[in-house]
């Protein structure tokens, strides 16, 4: 267990169940158990949150769903800042569970199952919500695929239940959310037609020597890969999307481009690369993936090799749109993590890449009516 504890930095334990199932009591015990292990923990309770949010929402199903989504977005925001969030709230709606699983790492939904008659008995001694046997069960979706179901009655103590939850969470921890990226990009590239090279590709081609060995990370539909190949560079192009690679291979059979599906670490015999090229990719991956990418780029570049990056800035207008996952992450159609230039430069230089060029501005990546604020960076392996 000590090894798993050391690896845990964030997550969500969502303790749910109908009113009087013991959510708050168990959540407090879970908070205590995790705190004693030295972990950063926050407990949010549904009743408290409703009041904190100003009792803005009603009690019809639509209002409850909207409120539940607000709970989970807040949990995501806190988890992204390296907290384990314990949420004790009913909020049992299938779309909310799916959203949490897709967008938050280390999520555990715990369903406290308690028979109706037992809940009514408990409720008479506390909130007295179940007046005259009236229940709110029909408003909610009883979890069919809860990660853990606990029968929280019949002599089972809150301490016993909390220890079961903590042990389950610690054993399960380590999952990384995909944020729906795989499905989105696979669908996107099924119909993404080849197009002309990007302005960034033209910019890069003017900065590099002839006949370079180039690695493009996140090649998409191959628009820039084919441009570099036609300019006599030796191109290896990778993307995580199966659909993208299938389409690239069928679109450019006449060009000597090695199209591969996966990450840099998945591709064999990568070394002594002259140029690594990454356009509109870093902002499409969570921070840990970016850190892993930077490490791999440093490994495969030859001494004096160059890393070219173009990505969306946190100062881009789009940053203000969409659902909030964290201080830098949004979902607006699909996942994006907007980049802070100074922090990107620091991460590059921490692994031994010297930033020799940087700019953050509009007018660099104009596409039709869109003129985003983007970052361009050139880093050299010293």
Image (spheres, rainbow, N blue to C red):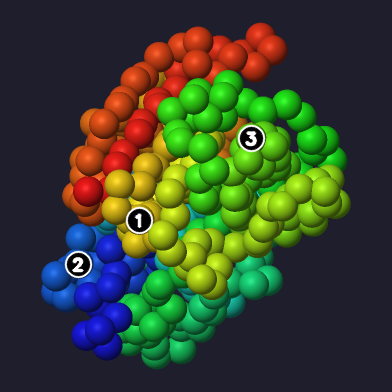
Give coordinates of residue 86: x percent, y percent. 35, 60
Are circles 3 and 1 on residues that touch, CB within 8 Å? no
What residue is rendered at 25% in x and 77% in y? 5
Q: Is residue 25 left or right of residue 312?
A: left
For label 2, the residue is 39
Residue closest to the eye, 26 or 330: 330
In the displayed structure, would residue 122 be above or below residue 53? below
For label 3, the residue is 231
Would residue 100 be seen by someone viewing this image from the given angle?
no
Mark 1 and mark 2: span between their CA atoms?
Answer: 41 Å
Dot 2, how many residues are within 10 Å of its Cα: few (below 14), some (14-19), or many (20+)?
Answer: some
Q: How many marks?
A: 3
Of mark 1 and mark 2, the one earlier in the sequence is 2
State which quadrant residue 322 falls in: top right
Mark 3 and mark 1: span between their CA atoms?
Answer: 21 Å
Mark 2 and mark 3: span between their CA atoms?
Answer: 53 Å
Give coordinates of residue 202: x percent, y percent. 56, 24
Label 1 element class: strand
Residue closest to the eye, 104 or 190: 190
Would residue 226 be seen by someone viewing this image from the given angle?
yes
Of mark 3 and mark 1, the one earlier in the sequence is 3
In the displayed structure, would residue 137 be above or below residue 356? below
Q: Which mark is residue 138?
A: none
For label 1, the residue is 302
Give coordinates of residue 361: x percent, y percent. 40, 14
What residue is rendered at 72% in x and 52% in y? 256
Label 3 element class: loop
Q: Is residue 237 left or right of residue 315?
A: right
């Amino acid at each position: 267990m000590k090894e798993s504890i050391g690896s845990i930095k964030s997550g969500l334990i969502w303790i749910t169940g109908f009113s009087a199932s013991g959510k708050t009591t168990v959540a407090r015990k879970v908070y205590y158990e995790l705190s004693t292990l030295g972990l950063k923990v926050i407990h949010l309770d549904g009743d408290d949150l409703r009041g904190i949010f100003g009792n803005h929402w009603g009690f019809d199903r639509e209002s409850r769903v909207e409120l539940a989504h607000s709970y989970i977005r807040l949990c995501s925001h806190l988890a992204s800042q390296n907290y384990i969030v314990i949420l004790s709230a009913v909020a049992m709606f299938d779309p909310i569970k799916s959203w949490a699983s897709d967008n938050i790492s280390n999520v555990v939904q715990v369903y406290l199952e308690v028979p109706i008659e037992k809940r009514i008995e408990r409720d008479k001694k506390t909130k007295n919500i179940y007046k005259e046997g009236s229940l709110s069960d029909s408003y909610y979706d009883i979890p069919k695929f809860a990660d853990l179901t606990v029968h929280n009655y019949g002599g089972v103590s809150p301490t016993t239940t909390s220890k079961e939850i903590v042990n389950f969470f610690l054993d399960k921890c380590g999952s990384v959310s995909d944020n729906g990226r795989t499905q989105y990009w696979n669908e996107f590239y099924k119909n993404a037609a080849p197009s002309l090279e990007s302005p960034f590709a033209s910019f890069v081609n003017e900065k590099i020597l002839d006949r370079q060995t180039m690695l493009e990370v996140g090649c998409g539909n191959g628009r820039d890969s084919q441009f570099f190949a036609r300019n006599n560079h030796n191109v290896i192009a990778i993307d995580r999307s199966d659909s993208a690679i299938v389409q690239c291979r069928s679109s450019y059979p006449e060009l000597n481009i090695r199209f591969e599906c996966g990450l840099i670490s998945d591709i064999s015999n990568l070394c002594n690369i002259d140029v690594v090229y990454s356009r509109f990719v870093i902002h499409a991956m969570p921070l840990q993936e970016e850190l892993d990418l930077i490490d791999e780029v440093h490994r495969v570049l030859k001494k004096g090799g160059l890393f070219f990056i173009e990505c969306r800035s946190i100062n881009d207008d789009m940053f203000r749109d969409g659902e909030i996952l964290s201080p830098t992450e949004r979902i607006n159609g699909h996942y994006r993590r907007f980049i802070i230039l100074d922090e990107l430069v620091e991460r590059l230089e921490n692994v031994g890449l010297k930033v020799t060029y940087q700019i953050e501005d509009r007018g660099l990546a104009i596409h039709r009516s869109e003129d985003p604020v983007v970052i361009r960076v050139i880093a050299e392996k010293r």
